[in-house]
Image: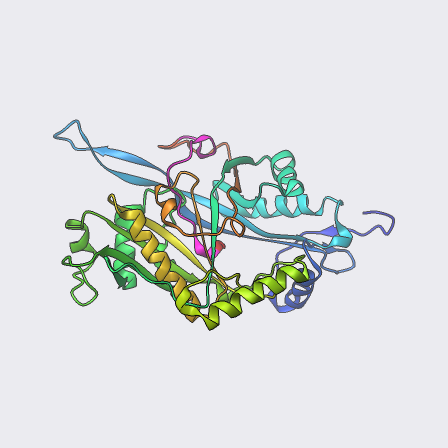
C-alpha cells in the first residue's frame, strides 16, 4: 500500500491490547485500520439483533375478517463507528473494513445490514451506495430541544405514570411490536441500567393514576380515549457531544441567555444550552400513543423528560422519529439544533434468503412510524 509496502490487515478487535490505540484514533479524528506495522489506522463496529421488518394478518377460521396483525422478524446487522485515520484515507481502508464486517454479519446469520449517516456526508453516502451496494432506505427526523435553566410546566390536564419495566414491555409488545425496527429483545432495552424509565400520559381525573395503576394488561383492555407513552435513555453515561466553529460573539450571546434564564426563571425565557464544550443528553425513544389528544400528551411527556434532563445536568434532549410520524407535532424542538432528514441505508446480504411474508425489505415503502433502538444512538 503506497511506497512503504505496508500490508493492510483486517482483524477482530482485541480489547486487551487494542483499547488504548483505538481511543487515540478516536481522539485524532475519524476512521482507522491495522497495517503491517501493527499501527491501528482504522476501525469499524457492528452488532446483530432481531427486529420487526413488517407484519402479517392471521385470519380467523370462522370468519373472513383479518384479526390483529403480528410482527414479521428478521436478523438485522447494524454498522456503526466506522473510523479511518486522517493520514490513511483514500486508500480503500473504509471499503475493506465494511466488507470485513459484512463477512462477519453473514457468518452470524444476518439477513440485512443497515447504517445511519448524514444526507450531506457525500463521502460516506458514496462509499455505501456506490461501492458497497447499499440503497437509501429511510429518512427519519432527529429532533433536538435545549434544556433550560428553569423547569417546564406539565399540563394539569394530564396524569403521568412511571411504568415498571415489566408493564412497559407488555405495553410495547402489545401495541408497537409491528412497528418497523422494533427490537425483539425490548425487555433487554427496558431493563438496561441506562434506561431511566418509561412514562405513560393519561387524562387527569380518570381511573388511572400512579397509586391505582392496575397494570398494562388491564389498561390495554380498557384504555382512555387518548394516551401516550415514551421512554428516556441516559446517553450522558455513554458519550458527550460538542459543537465547534462558533464565533466568540455567538458563545457570549448563548452564555448571556443562560445567565438571564437562571436569574429570572419565573419568566421561562428560552436559553441556548452550553453546547460549545462537551455536553450530554437524554434520548427519548419508544414514542407512541392513541387518540385525538395523543400529540398533546406527548408534549406533556416531553416537558417531563426535559425536567428529568435538567436534574441530570444534561444540555439537550433528543429523539428520532419517522418523517410521517403523526405524533411528531407534539415533540418540541429547535430547528437550528435538529436534522430534518437523517439517512438510513440498507443492504440485503444474501439472495438465498426467503422473501417470506414481506418480500425484500429493502424495497418496502416507509411506514408511519419507526422504533429507534437507544443502544445504537
Count of numbered circles on the image: 0
Figure quadrant of residue 40: bottom right
Highlighted magenta segment, given as a residue range: 359-375
Is 174 positioned to the left or the right of 32 in the image?
left
Q: Is residue 32 magenta?
A: no
Q: Position of residue 194 (x, y in %)?
A: 42, 65
Task: Give whichever of 231, 73 is nearer the camera.
Answer: 231
Q: Position of residue 127 (x, y in %)?
A: 65, 40
Q: Is residue 369 magenta?
A: yes
Is 4 positioned to the left or the right of 187 in the image?
right
Q: Position of residue 147 (x, y in %)?
A: 46, 63
Colouring scheme, one of rainbow, by chain, secondary structure, one colour: rainbow
Q: Is residue 17 visible?
A: yes
Q: Which residue is pictured at 77% across the width and 56% down the height? A: 36
Q: Position of residue 370 (x, y in %)?
A: 40, 44
Q: Residue furthest bottom?
A: 263
Is 40 positioned to the left or the right of 334 in the image?
right
Task: Give whichever of 166, 248 is nearer the camera.
Answer: 248
Q: Is residue 191 visible?
A: no
Q: Residue furthest left?
A: 62
Figure quadrant of residue 196: bottom left
Q: Main secondary structure of the magenta part?
A: loop
Q: Which residue is pictured at 35% across the width and 43% down the height? A: 179
Task: Give whichever of 352, 158 is nearer the camera.
Answer: 158
Task: Give whichever of 377, 288 is nearer the camera.
Answer: 288
246 is higher (above) or lower (below) than 344: below
Q: Residue furthest right?
A: 3
74 is higher (above) or lower (below) than 308: above
Amino acid at each position: 500500500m503506497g511506497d512503504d509496502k505496508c500490508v493492510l490487515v483486517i482483524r477482530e478487535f482485541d480489547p486487551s491490547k487494542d483499547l488504548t490505540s483505538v481511543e487515540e484514533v478516536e481522539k485524532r479524528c475519524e476512521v482507522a485500520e491495522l497495517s503491517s506495522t501493527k499501527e491501528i489506522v482504522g476501525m469499524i463496529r457492528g452488532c446483530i439483533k432481531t427486529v420487526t421488518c413488517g407484519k402479517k394478518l392471521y385470519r380467523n377460521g370462522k370468519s373472513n375478517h383479518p384479526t390483529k396483525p403480528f410482527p414479521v422478524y428478521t436478523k438485522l446487522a447494524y454498522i456503526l463507528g466506522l473510523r479511518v485515520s486522517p493520514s490513511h484515507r483514500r486508500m480503500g481502508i473504509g471499503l475493506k473494513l465494511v466488507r470485513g464486517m459484512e463477512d462477519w454479519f453473514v457468518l452470524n446469520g444476518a439477513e440485512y445490514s443497515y447504517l445511519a449517516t448524514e444526507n450531506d456526508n457525500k463521502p460516506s453516502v458514496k462509499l455505501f451506495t456506490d461501492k458497497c451496494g447499499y440503497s437509501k432506505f429511510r429518512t427519519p427526523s432527529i429532533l433536538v430541544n435545549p434544556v433550560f435553566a428553569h423547569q417546564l410546566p406539565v399540563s394539569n390536564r394530564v396524569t403521568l405514570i412511571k411504568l415498571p419495566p415489566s408493564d412497559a414491555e407488555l405495553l410495547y409488545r402489545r401495541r408497537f411490536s409491528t412497528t418497523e425496527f422494533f427490537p425483539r429483545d425490548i425487555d433487554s432495552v427496558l431493563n438496561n441500567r441506562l434506561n431511566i424509565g418509561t412514562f405513560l400520559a393519561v387524562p387527569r381525573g380518570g381511573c388511572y393514576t400512579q397509586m391505582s395503576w392496575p397494570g398494562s394488561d388491564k389498561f390495554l383492555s380498557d384504555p382512555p380515549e387518548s394516551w401516550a407513552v415514551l421512554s428516556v435513555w441516559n446517553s450522558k453515561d455513554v458519550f458527550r457531544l460538542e459543537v465547534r466553529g462558533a464565533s466568540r460573539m455567538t458563545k457570549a450571546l448563548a452564555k448571556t441567555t443562560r445567565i438571564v434564564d437562571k436569574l429570572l426563571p419565573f419568566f421561562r425565557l428560552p436559553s441556548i444550552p452550553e453546547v460549545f464544550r462537551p455536553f450530554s443528553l437524554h434520548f427519548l425513544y419508544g414514542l407512541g400513543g392513541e387518540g385525538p389528544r395523543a400529540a398533546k400528551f406527548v408534549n406533556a411527556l416531553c416537558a417531563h423528560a426535559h425536567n428529568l434532563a435538567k436534574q441530570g445536568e444534561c444540555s439537550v434532549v433528543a429523539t428520532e422519529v419517522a418523517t410521517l410520524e403523526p405524533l411528531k407535532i407534539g415533540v418540541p424542538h429547535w430547528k437550528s439544533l435538529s436534522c430534518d432528514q437523517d439517512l438510513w441505508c440498507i443492504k440485503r446480504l444474501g439472495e438465498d434468503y426467503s422473501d417470506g411474508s414481506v418480500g425484500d425489505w429493502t424495497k418496502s415503502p416507509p411506514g408511519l412510524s419507526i422504533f429507534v433502538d437507544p443502544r445504537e444512538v
